[in-house]
Image: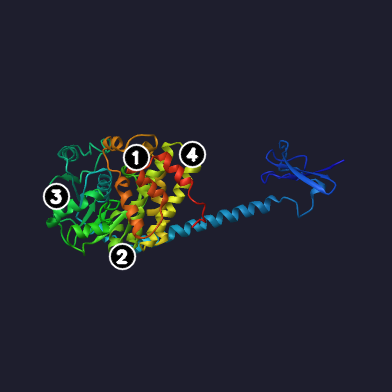
Amino acid sequence: MAAQVECWFLNPLCFSNSPTSHSRHSIKLQSFRSGPNAFLLLSPAKPCHCSFLENPSPATENPSSTYNPDITSDSRRDRRKAVRVAWEKLLRWSRTWELKAKTDVLEGTKKVVVLGGGSFGTAMAAHVADRKAELEVKMFVRDPHVCRSINENHFNCKYFPEYKLPENLVATTDVSAALLGADFCLHAVPVQFTSYFLEGIARHVDPNLPFISLSKGLELHTLRMMSQIIPRALRNPRQPFVALSGPSFALELMRKLPTAMVVASKDKNLANAAQQLLASQYLRISTSSDVTGVEIAGALKNVLAIAAGIVDGMNLGNNSMAALVAQGCSEIRWLATKMGAKSTTITGLSGTGDIMLTCFVNLSRNRTVGVRLGSGEKLNDILSSMNQVAEGITTAGAVIALAQRYNVKMPVLTAVARIIDNELTPEKAVLELMNLPQVEEV
């Protein structure tokens, strides 16, 4: 007949050593033996009726197995002290860093121009205007109705009708007046229209005016990034350039929710200046010298977001979503590193951070396009119903051309491009992707 042995795993909050008086959260381990074989069962214990004053049972007075509340309390105090000390060191380091950091950029900046009155351009214009009440922020917009709404009522009636804008943010339809005397330019014109727009205003642009690009994507026919488009369109290869990227929805910036982004420039001093201009209590700005990595990640994540939306629209489940996004991240890393980017950039804020936000959150325009495609809607119908640009649609074709140029295989992003070109249905794309050869993970 099998013998039964009971061992009690006591709740650490219960200070009784009695096996008959134990915590309601303790566990009973039962060992059943029969011949050479044995197996263990875990079962719930009885409710605890122990007390702090209860005497230990003689059967459990072995020092090696006795629970000592004093030792546990000391350990807990030591752990809490270590955590507190670590946090205090972090705060001291932060205060020391702030004292050393220069703040003269914001103090010396008198005027910032924002080119483009879309949602993100408006959000960043409002953010910069909030940084200093004396700062003049001029936003160039094309729509006279939006211009009047901003100047008379301090609302962007088209994108943020419920969010009041700072009074030192002024809109204009005169681009030369907007640019005159500006210390920084925030460029928020969509990628596909940037060359045409800048070529038309080049004569009004100071050759030393730093451009901080808020636009993400690749020019379809030339495959150029914004760091290449802007100097070329302005006919000034030395035009100071900074790329701003990272996980950021315009709506949450307007609500002043905590956000973190990256500014990238080959000029370290310029990156630091942009950081000082933009960083605030609710917007953290990191710097990077990897312009290519930041721009490529920012462009390709839009295409991946369309793929993620298609998976959601087809109701393929969470397993499919995780697999697709992981594969897409690898494809972005393969191409970016071939183009000279750092792999650490792709796993940072402007890469993985932006990918997670754009692929998993419903506020994403590109993801929304994917959801509707996956649900069976036609692309033309989707585009005609949108009042904002989903850059991933035009970027998809450019991404595939880049992949061919650098000899990189990108199955997921290629499938998105073929769906957008109406050469492949979402259902057929899933089938073909799942039937690809089973290979080693790279």
Disc 4/disc 1 C-alpha distance (Å) = 18 Å
Disc 1/disc 3 C-alpha distance (Å) = 32 Å
The x, y position of residue 181, in whole percent, is: 15, 56
Which residue, given by chain and number where applicable, does mark 2 sit on? 268
- The answer to whether residue 342 is left or right of residue 30 is left
**Depth check, front residue: 92 or 196:** 196
Any mark on residue 175, and which? 3
Amino acid tagged 3: Val
Question: Mark 1 or mark 3: which comes first in sequence?
Answer: 3
Q: Quadrant of residue 32?
A: top right
Badge 3 density bin: few <14, some 14–19, many ≥20, Cα 10 Å: some
Amino acid tagged 4: Gly
Amino acid tagged 2: Lys
Disc 3 on helix, strand or loop? Answer: helix
Question: Mark 2 or mark 1: which comes first in sequence?
Answer: 2
The N terminus sits in image quarter? top right
- The answer to whether residue 328 is left or right of residue 223 is right
